[in-house]
Image (cartoon, helix red, strand yellow):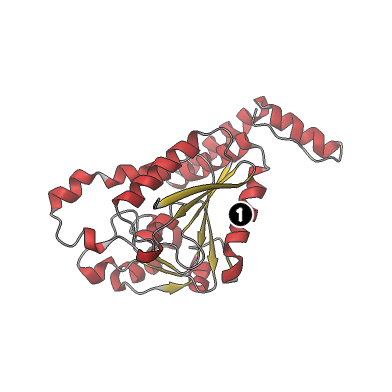
Amino acid sequence: MNEVVVERPAPHVAVIRMNRPEARNALNQAVRSGLAEHFTALGADPDIRAIVLTGGDTVFAAGADLRDLADRGAIEILLRNNHLLWQAIADCPKPVIAAVNGLAWGGGCELAMHADLIVAGESASFCQPEVKVGVMPGAGGTQRLTRAVGKFKAMKMVLTGLPVSAREADAMGLVSEVVADADVQTRALELAVLIARRPPLAVTQIKEVLLAGADAALDTGLMLERKAFQLLFASRDQKEGMHAFLDKREPEFTGE
C-alpha cells in the first residue's frame, strides 16, 4: 500500500493524501520521503497550479511515529536529515491548501503549517504535544507557530502540550477557515480550483513575496512586492486579465 497517494481530481489541481489509516497517518520515514518526493515533482510540474494536502475524512496526521523514535540516538536522528524532507514541502512554489479533519498533532500540526491555507473541520484539533514525551517540536512547531499566532499563544501550546479546537485555532490565526467536517475536502478542493483559475505567474509571485517579506524588514518586503508587481506587466496574463475585465468577459490565463 502506498503511504502517500497523489490524485488529480480537477484541471491543474493535485491532491496529496497521506494513507496510513491504521496509524492515524503517523509520520514515519516512508511518509516523510513520499511527501517530499511528490511536493518536489508537483512543484516542478507546469500543469499543476494548486495542491491540496490531506489525510482523508477522519484524521490529518496524529504526529510522528513514536515506535520509530523511542530508542533512537541523537546521531541517528541527525543523520536522517529530515529537515531536507520538510524543506522540500516548504520550497514548493505552488499554493498548498491543507484540508484538516480530526487530529493535526505534533508533526501533523507542523505539516499543516507548511501549507499556505488551512481549511479545518469543526471537530479538528491542533496540538504540539512533544513536551509530554520528553522532547520538543522539531519541524517548525516553535518557529512557524510563533509567526502564525504570536508568542503567548505559541508558548501555551508548546509548553503545555494541550490541544486547541478548530474554533480556537481560527480565533488565534492558525487556520484560514472552519467548515463542517463533511465539507472540509470539498471546500479545500473548491479553493484549489479557484486558485488554479487565477494567473499562475501572479499566484507564484504572490506566494513568493508574501513568504519572503514575512521575515524581512518592511522596507525590504515593500521593495520585493513592488518589483514583482512591475515584473508581472511583462506577462501575457496581465494583458489578458485587464483586457478581459474591460471587455466584460472571463479571462483565459495561460501562465505566460
Q: Nearer the viewer, residue 130 or 242?
A: 130
Q: Position of residue 189 (x, y in %)?
A: 61, 54
Vertical placement of residue 123 versus 238, above or below = below
Q: Position of residue 98 (x, y in %)?
A: 50, 56
Vertical placement of residue 114 versus 11, above or below = below
* Residue 91 visible in the snapshot: no
Q: Is residue 149 left or right of residue 68?
A: right
Give the tally of numbered discs: 1
Q: Is residue 65 left or right of residue 253?
A: left
Crowding near the residue tagged with mark 1, few <14, some 14–19, many ≥20 C-alpha atoms within 10 Å: many
Q: Is residue 137 left or right of residue 236?
A: left
Q: Quadrant of the C terminus?
A: top right
* Residue at 48% in and 68% down: 58
* Residue at 19% in and 44% down: 79
Q: Nearer the viewer, residue 91 or 9?
A: 9
Q: Residue furthest top?
A: 234
Query: Which image quadrant is residue 127 in?
Result: bottom left
Q: Position of residue 195 (x, y in %)?
A: 63, 46
Query: Which image quadrant is residue 201 in?
Result: top right
Residue named by callout 1: 189
Q: Nearer the viewer, residue 153 or 94?
A: 94
Vertical placement of residue 213 versus 234, above or below = below
* Residue at 65% in and 55% down: 190
Give the residue type that dot 1 points to. Leu
Q: Position of residue 217 (x, y in %)?
A: 45, 43
Element assignment for label 1: helix
* Residue at 31% in and 69% down: 129
Q: Residue furthest front?
A: 1
* Residue 243 visible in the snapshot: yes
